[in-house]
Amino acid sequence: MRQLSSKPRSMKDVPTHYCPGCGHGLIHRLVCEVVDELGVREETIAVAPVGCAVLAYDYWDFDTLEAAHGRTPAVATGIKRVQPGKLVFTYQGDGDLAAIGTAEIIHAGNRGENISVVFVNNGVYGMTGGQMAPTTLLGQMTATTPRTRRPKEEGFPMKITEMMATLSGVAYLERTAVSSPRGVMATKKAILRSFRTQLEGKGFSMVEVLSPCPTYWGMDPVRAMERIEKEVVKQYPVGVIKE
Amino acid sequence: MAKSIKIDTERCKGCMLCVNVCPKKVLKLTDKVNKKGHRYVVAEDAGKCTGCRLCVTMCPDCSIEVTEEE
Amino acid sequence: MKKVRYLSTGNEACGEGAVRAGCLFYGGYPITPQNELTAYMAKRMNEEGRVFIQSESELSAINMVFGASAAGYRAMTTSSSPGISLKQEGISYMAGCELPGVIVNVMRGGPGLGNIAPSQSDYFQATKGGGHGDYRIIVLAPSTVQEMFDFTYEAFALADKYRNPVMVLADGMLGQMMEPVEFDEDIKPSGMVKKPWAMTGAKGRPAQSVKSLFLADGMLEELNIRLQKKFRLIEKNEIRYENYQTKDADIVFVAYGTIGRMARACVDDLRDKGIKAGLMRPVTLWPFPYDEIKRLAKGGTKFFVTEMSAGQMVEDVRLAVQDDERIYFYGRMGGGIPTPEEINASLEEQVLEKVREGK
């Protein structure tokens, strides 16, 4: 009998607390697959965010440090600067990266810190009950936009990855989506490229992954994936943003 | 070579991403419920499985195992 | 042993103390009155091939220190009052994760933006919390440029010994003044310890994490019980103070830092006038030398507490003595700096009659 599918060695064989159809399960697995393929599990130090993925250390079989909300890139800077030979990556949601952590991500990019960032964009704050995120779309209903997101009152969805492209210290930026098998494969490829960018000392890189939140989008997982393909990509097109 | 497909029904959360992506309609959501309270997916038409592994690709919970008889 | 001796500002002596203690990572943001310290670290860390980052904010700096410390290396950040307010979250996280690290506060006038004059109004912030949660940090209070070097140097060993943040609490005057500083030419870092818990990568050991989130029932309480045991141990072992002429004193000054050195002059002036004055200078503000003050309080001694604040340490003196009638206070706020004459004038006004009458 030949195994055609396998769980990554770096992924702990435990059930996750994530909702049915949540993108985190997929993206966690892809990160682990990449770590295994590069053979760097013993040199990897991950920095987990505050958000649904705060419990990532329960799922990853490599060293994982918990950072204060938004400070993740600063913490990663500290780790990488004193241990330049390790693979250091952050895994952040849209609140952690684009709201409270805006200064930290921009300046880590501006300094060209040789780290990798996995940015999970699902357009809401999941852990705390579905509030608006900087990446929430116009017209989207959330716990703090009961009248849906309106430009005058709540501003526009932020395209922070495009903003980061203006920074000379940033070597590689790509946006992908896990909404289809092709998208999942592209996400894995992008994460692999980001980690390689770091291992080759080329500077800062980030992969923004469009991910579903079925619970707070108020739809089943299959429809949530469809929403990404039909609506979210209109505001956040996939592709390489900087290389 | 016969393909064998198995779902870890206790891990499955019934998200249906696998069902949605299977080109041969092998997988189906059952009415049964696991210990966590999720309705789970089974390989109802396992004989039709071609081993394409699109289901494995889309599963967020590493709940699907696809093997091949040598 | 050959000694190095030169004239230095307090800020730069502090920086040199960190370098000699093996500080590998420094993150800081400019703020008066400690800019010379940040600039000095930029120079020296680059000279030594170590890491210096001017961070985008004080908030970011403490988190970089958090990361470097989690990786097992000695790390420091410095700032002044408003910037230290920003760091409180990071300090709480370091205490919760049991991470060593050194934070230097060169105090200035507050609250708010305040001014750039020296002050001692961050005593509460340093010793009673500042950040959220049940934790303590060791607080060292230098009062000379030499102590700026010594205490910063020792802070790293203390931090490693207890896996806890340590603060060096100075003020703008101490940071700016120039005095000789002296140390052994070949001084090496002291108190280096192995850090098996550090984030170094899961090679030859299981993967581990450094975190302060403990959601499972009872787990966080367990952590807190362990932390409290640690703090009791620190209280038992690390209290430091300096007594000056307290043996036969009727009235004892309690003062620290810049005012601590000023109070010496006050004691000398009073002794010249035939008043039996003394000085108890706390060196660790936490753990606070309550027992020593209790001991000095026997026999009806009076205490004159003087601070550059509205009166913060005086509350700890009251706690120790348990007799408010015997405790007097003189303070200047908002960056105001007293003189020994001014302090003694207040003492005369408030206390002296009573001391002369043997009350």
Image: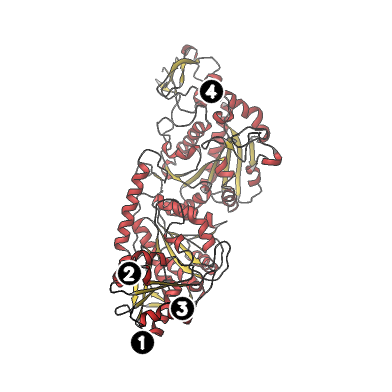
Local secondary structure at mark 2 = helix
How far apart marks 2 and 3 lie (CA) works out to 22 Å
Q: Residue most toward the right?
A: A152
List x then y, in percent, for residue B53. 50, 22
User: Which mark's residue is nearer the viewer, 2 or 3?
Assistant: 3
List x then y, in percent, for residue C182. 40, 76
Q: Quadrant of the N terminus of chain C?
A: bottom left
Camera-nearest residue between A110 and C67: C67
Camera-nearest residue between A187 and A126: A126
Local secondary structure at mark 4 = helix
Local secondary structure at mark 3 = helix
> In the picture provided, is A239 more to the left or to the right than B41?
right
Which amino acid is tagged 2? Ile
Residue hosting label 2: C293
Which amino acid is tagged 4? Leu
Q: Chain of mark 4?
A: B
- Whether label 2 touches label 4, CB < 8 Å: no
Do dots 4 and 1 share one subunit? no
Residue hosting label 4: B17
Residue A29 seen from this side: yes
Query: Coloured how?
Result: secondary structure
What numbered label is drawn on residue C307? none
Which amino acid is tagged 1? Gly
User: Which mark's residue is nearer the viewer, 1 or 2?
Assistant: 1
List x then y, in percent, for residue A236. 65, 36
Camera-nearest residue between A207 and C18: C18
Residue hosting label 3: C346
Residue hosting label 1: C274
Q: Residue at x 63, y 46 (%)?
A: A164
Do dots 2 and 3 share one subunit? yes
Looking at the image, residue A104 lies above or below residue C282: above
Marks 3 and 1, the one that precedes in the sequence: 1
